[in-house]
Amino acid sequence: MPRPLRPVAAAVTSILVAAVAVGALVAAAPAVASPALAASAAAAAPAALSAPAIPSAPRDTSVSIAGCPVNTANVGSRYFSLLRAHDRAVFSLIGTLPAGLTLDAESGAIRGVPTAEGSSGFTLVATSRDERAEYGPCFIDVGPSLDPPTLATGCPVDDAVVDQPYRFAMAASGPEGMVYSATGLPAGLGVDPVSGLISGTATVPGMSTVTVSVTGLGGTSTKTGCAFTVRLPDRPVIVSCPAPDAVVGLPYSGSIRVKSDAAVDYGASWLPAGLELDHATGVISGVPAVAGRFPIIVDAANAWGGYARMSCEISVRAR
C-alpha cells in the first residue's frame, strides 16, 4: 500500500499549484491602467521612440567661396584681387569696400586705387541658381602711400616775356592721381593741375616768388622760393628792307621784316607816290605813279618802348 505524504511536503505542493493557476489568470487578463499612470509612463518613455523631424530641402553645396580677397592695400597704389567660387556665381557683399575700390559682380574682381587709409570689413556673398553662400568676415586694410610724389623739375627755369605766350611743364614721379599747383604766378599765367603745365601770357613786367607743388594721395612735394621774372620784350630788330624795285603802273608789294618777341607797330617815311604801308603787318603795297629813286626810312616800335629804324630805298622805273 502506498506511503502517505508527509504533512509539510503536501502543504508546499498545494502552494505551488495555486501560484501557477494565479499566474495563468493574470497573463490572460487585459492590462488596465489609470489615466495618471498612463501619463507617467509616457513621460518616462525614451526619446528614441518619438517621431523624427521632417528634414528641410537640401542646399546646393557646390556654391561656396574660396576665401577672402587680399587684405592689404596702400593709398595711391593699384589694388587687384580675384574672388573665386566652386560654382559659377554672381558676387556681392554685405558692408563696404575701401574708398576707391569696386567689385565686379560677374568676374569677382576687386580693383581700383585706394584713396584713404583705414580698414573696411565686409561679408562676401555668392549667388548661383537662386542659392547663395556667404563667407566672412573679410577685411582690407589700407596703409599709407608707398610712393610719395617727387617734383623732378623744380622751379621754372625760363623768364616770361610781357605779351608773349609762356610755357613750362612741371614733371613729377609718384602714385596715381597727383595734383600740381603753383602759387604766386604773375598775372596772365596759370597751371593745369593734371598735366603740371604752367602757361599763359604775362601782362605785367616784374619779379615774383612762386611756390610750385605736386600733391599725391600720400603726401606733398614742394619747391618754395622760386624767383620768377617777367621781363620786357627785347628791342625789335629790322632784318630787311622792302623789295627795292618797282615799275610805274604795275602793282608793287614789299615787306619790312622785323625780329621781335612782341607785337610792333610799323612806320615808313617818304614812300613813292601810289604806295602805302600797313602799320600792323609792315607790308608796303600799291601802284607806283612816278619813276625815280626814293630813299625811305622804315621803323618798328613795340608798346614797351622798344624801337628800331633803318634807311632803305625803292627804285621805281618807267615801263
Image: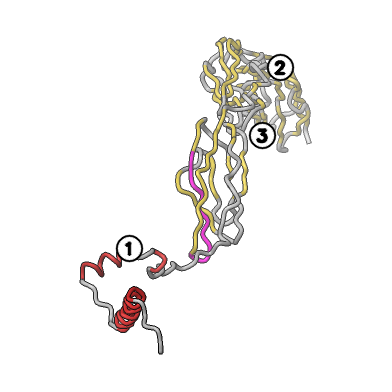
Disc 2 marks which residue?
237
Question: Would you say 40 lies left or right of 72 here?
Answer: left
Disc 3 marks which residue?
286
Residue at the image point whose x is 54% and y is 18% from the top: 185
Please say if the residues under marks 3 and 2 sit with CB atoms less than 8 Å apart: no
Question: Would you say 247 lies left or right of 173 here?
Answer: right
Q: Main secondary structure of the magenta part?
A: strand
Viewer-nearest of discs 1 and 3: 1
Q: Amino acid at mark 2?
A: Val
| 198 and 40: which is toward the camera | 40
Give the answer, above or below, for where 90 lies relative to 6.
above
Q: Mark 1 to mark 3: distance in Å?
A: 132 Å
Residue at the image point whose x is 66% and y is 13% from the top: 235
Residue at the image point whose x is 70% and y is 22% from the top: 258
Disc 1 marks which residue?
44
Q: Which residues are magenta?
A: 121-130
User: Which of the labelled discs sits on residue 264, or is there none?
Assistant: none
- Sequence order check, earlier mark of 3 and 2: 2
| 278 and 5: which is toward the camera | 5
Give percent across and percent down for residue 113.
58, 38
